[in-house]
Image: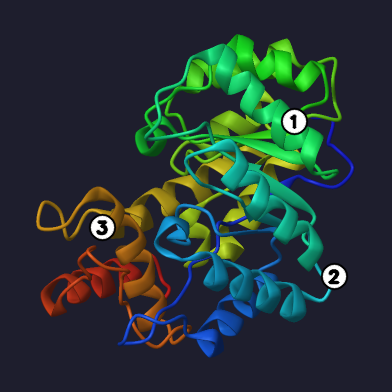
Amino acid sequence: MALPARFHGVVPPVVTPLTTDYRVDYGSFTAVIEHLLAGGVHGLFILGSTSEVVFHDEATRRAILEHAVKVVNGRAPILAGTIDPTTDRVIGHARAAKAIGVDAMVVTAPFYTRTSQPEVVDHFRYVREAVDAPIIAYDIPVCVHTKLERATIVTLAREGAIAGVKDSSGDEGGFRYLLSDLADRPEVFLMTGAELTVDGILLAGAHGVVPGLGNVDPHAYVRLYAAARRGDWAQARKEQDRLSRLFEIVRVSLPRTSAGSAGVGGFKTAMRRLGIIQTNIMARPQRSLNDEESARVEAILRDVGLV
């Protein structure tokens, strides 16, 4: 696979640890960043869905980005989620993120407001015109309820309105088509958020992965990616199979919690057990994992050799 110059590899969406009074725990946040960098990741996605971005107000988002930029200190590229329902609010977040010093902005389709695909195209164009920085299209219809259609992404990529895509659509066939459609544009990077099928998607030519589970075990995703880069697909599959067992931590609290609480809450609970963060608190009204569910998470961590 040909790689874009700057954005590729394993780029976890970074968990935002909270205190028991629902404030950002910046000491634990520093520990998360250092844990990920020590794991060999190739970049960090701050203020994504796994970061619980929409639960943080504007001032808190800025403080989170400022802290991340200071701690990372140029050791890896930082992608910043500038996610909000409407164009001008996104532009405001993006301008602030650029001023803070991040390397790229991650933008979804508008949400709550109902828009057409042509209006979604305009949305990305407006953001790119307003902010001279790489814009990454985040395709996550489960959250924003709009799928970025194949033609929309190809149009935006070919005209330079977006520099890449983070695909969390669940449409792996559609992502495969994008890899083919944009094969002649190696500067456009295409990364998957599908944590359970990374080996296969890398084999198809993806440039990397944005795994929430990478907060728990970044080393394993980095090993998987390295195996894929050298063409050792048997080793890549072995790593993927183990990560698939670890991914079971996202199911232990269902159906008592929402899918989002179960996923990020599972990551936070595992990270608390590993001594990376202090609490597994979720932003309200999401539910945190309870003691029984935490014990089940620990059993899974033991099964895969993390404790």
Query: Hey, which quadrant is residue 292 in on the image?
Result: bottom left
Q: Say whether residue 4 is left or right of residue 27.
A: right
Of all residues shown, which one is farthest toward the front?
Answer: 88
Disc 1 to disc 3, C-alpha distance: 31 Å
Question: Which image quarter holds the C terminus?
Answer: bottom left
Work out whether residue 42 can be spotted. Answer: no
Question: Which image quarter holds the N terminus?
Answer: top right
- Under mark 3, the amino acid is Ala
**In this rendering, which labeled residue sits more in front, label 2 or label 1?**
1
Residue denoted by label 3: 262
- Under mark 2, the amino acid is Gly
Determine the residue positioned at 43% across, 41% down: 196
Label 2 or label 1, whichever comes before in sequence order: 2
Determine the residue positioned at 61% across, 76% down: 63
Disc 2 to disc 1, C-alpha distance: 23 Å
Kindly state the secondary structure of the residue where label 2 is placed. loop
Residue denoted by label 1: 162
Query: Hey, which quadrant is residue 266 in on the image?
Result: bottom left
Residue 209, percent from left and from top: 61, 44
Residue denoted by label 2: 74
Q: Residues within 10 Å of mark 3 (few under 14, many from 20)?
A: many
In depth, the one of 239 and 114 nearer the eye is 114
Label 2 or label 3, whichever comes before in sequence order: 2
Residue 101, percent from left and from top: 81, 64
Residue 102, percent from left and from top: 77, 60
